[in-house]
Image (cartoon, rainbow, N blue to C red):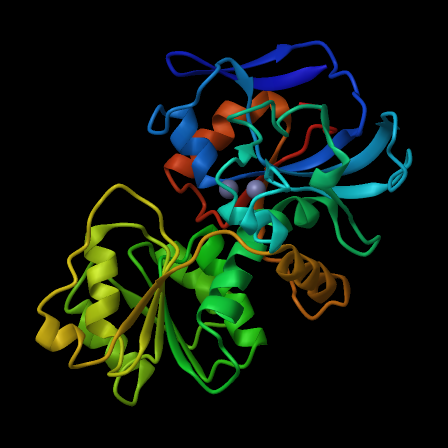
Amino acid sequence: MKAVRLYEGPEVRVEDVLEPEVGPGQIRVAVEAAGLCGTDLHAARGHLPVPGLPVIMGHEGAGIVEAVGAGVSEFGAGDRVLILPSETCGNCPACQDGHLGLCPAARIFGMARDGTFAEKIAVPASCALPLPDGIAFEHGAILADAVATAYHAVATRAGITGGERIAVLGCGGVGHHAILLARLLGAKTIVAADASPGSLRRAEEAGADATVDVSSGNARKAIREAAGGGGPDLVIEYVGKKASVELAMASVARGGRVIVGGVGMESPALGPLVSFVGREIGVLGSMGYTRAELDRVVELTATGRLDLSGSITARYPLDRAAEALDDLENRRNDPVRLALLPGASS
Ligand SMILES: [Zn+2]
Ligand SMILES: [Zn+2]
């Protein structure tokens, strides 16, 4: 079968490999669509250490079950499924709570083991979820990463219940879905802030009321004015840089909260305590999501309340994976999420 493999170098190669065996407790899935995440790009460029190369890339995927291993009763051949981004231990406190993103033993597909950028993948049955007929494979592929991660930040960590003024800093893949979900959950005002005019245009399409180009002028002032009142009650950060987290903390209203979902190696400063404490700012990290939250976004999508029609902005056959990575890196055509379609001919 055809697969996209990452080698030392780093180097990305599309090559023919053996189909994966389906072991006990596993299912083999014919991948219909795979999402291309920023993490894949970091891995492909050598910015993230990937142990055990070469490895088939990709941790977002959906497809059709074509074989089940011994002991698997919950799936059968022909079932539509979405695949979770990692294999978790099932035993730690986070797993027992259903919080898949916090398992310290999680092994992410496409890095710790072979992933979804292939015609077929074998995964433990516990790493798959039924995909309702009404949800396209390319949307199923991103629900368990770009969408559920945004839902956890907006619904649970930010606790949006309706009526809030919010700002989203960084409106690419996850930030775009944070805007869609904040609108759905009843935010009063949504300000989208990004340095890319294309991302801001797509943010407006997703439901943002106002946009702020953070690359020009006084971004803090612009965000606070656009949000109205004393500034946004909530700022959700998806850039993962020191300057961006500090901008979020400076922009939020007195008594407001900053949810940081952007991951990186930089260290933002809290600032003088007289300001941090005096303005009573809350700063919370947000990582992954729970199984119940994933079920919720599947349901919201299946019932049409969550409209992902603007989420996949370009599609590529596996042969053109290197081009897709390049397009994502250069933000060509203002990507939200790019999809690889292993079933498509090149
Ligand atoms: Zn991802
Ligand atoms: Zn665990």
Horizontal and vertical percent for residue 111? 51, 26
**In the image: residue 316, left or right of residue 268:** right
Residue 103, image x, y percentages: 52, 43
Q: Residue at x 54, y 67 (%)?
A: 180
Work out which residue is located at the far bottom of the displayed protein and give it.
229
Which residue is at a point 73% across and 63% down the rendered structure image?
299
Q: Residue at x 27, y 75 (%)?
A: 252
Question: Is 231 placed left or right of 91 in the picture?
Answer: left
Q: Nearer the viewer, residue 140 or 157?
A: 157
**Image: 129 above or below 179:** above
| Closer to us: 234 or 105 | 105
Task: Tell me the residue at 36%/75% (across/down).
Answer: 234
- Residue 169 spot, x, y in % from top left: 34, 62
Quadrant including the N terminus: top right
- Placement of 261 over or under 315, stated as above or below: below
Residue 233 vs residue 153: left or right? left
Residue 112 percent across, percent down from the top left: 52, 25
Q: For residue 194, what is the image quadrant?
A: bottom left
**Which image quadrant: the C terminus?**
top right
